Image (cartoon, helix red, strand yellow):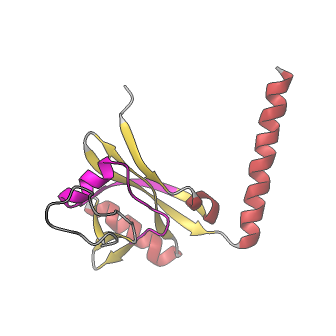
Amino acid sequence: MKEERKVVARNRKAFHDYEILERIEAGVSLLGPEVKTLREGKASLQEAYAAFKGDELFLLQMHVPEYAHKGYAPHDPVRPRKLLLHRQELRRLFTSIERRGFTLIPLEIYFKKGRAKVELAVARGRKHGDKREHVREQEARREARQTERRAR
């Protein structure tokens, strides 16, 4: 049985700018109005990244606009949001980032079984030449698929 996921926002540019090495699902600690805004499908992950503050992991620079029908409790649209992971997962991520120089970037934010989740990627930044090579590889794969379809 396939799990139901309602995707709120995707970081499409991440696949161009970074080489994705590993993916991790984490819960996100949100305020009430933030959850309502996410349910409306309003959020941006373009400048977002995850970083450790002490022994906790936070999602930084994710933009969640204020809830349109707010009556109270305004929130900062780009406030740090705590990510919820098991302690051993946090330790493993910390060592990958600190020792190997990787970065944590969010790929998408979605609802799964009514809970807000974020898919994080352990990634390595691409240099300009690497980006060009990646685009060439994608185009070659696309052309191969098209010729395969035509041959059928």
Q: Residue furthest bottom?
A: 54
User: From the viewer's perspective, is 105 left or right of 116?
Assistant: right
Q: Residue furthest top?
A: 152
Give the camera-side residue of 98 and 134: 134
Rendering quarter of residue 131:
bottom right
Q: Position of residue 152 (x, y in %)?
A: 82, 19
Q: Position of residue 148 (x, y in %)?
A: 81, 29
Give the camera-side residue of 7 and 20: 7
User: From the viewer's perspective, is 89 left or right of 49?
Assistant: left
Q: Which residues fall within the magenta stretch?
A: 22-50
Rendering quarter of residue 88:
bottom left
| As drawn, 117 above or below 65 | above
Q: Position of residue 143 (x, y in %)?
A: 82, 40
Q: Residue at x 84, y 25 (%)?
A: 150
The quadrant the N terminus occupies is: top left
Rendering quarter of residue 50:
bottom left
Q: Residue at x 77, y 52 (%)?
A: 137
| As drawn, 29 above or below 25 | below
User: From the viewer's perspective, is 10 left or right of 136?
Assistant: left
The answer to if 1 sits in the magenta stretch is no
Q: Position of residue 98 (x, y in %)?
A: 45, 77
| As drawn, 38 above or below 123 | above
The answer to if 30 sits in the magenta stretch is yes
Q: Residue at x 37, y 41 (%)?
A: 6
Q: Residue at x 47, y 64 (%)?
A: 105
User: From the viewer's perspective, is 43 left or right of 143?
Assistant: left
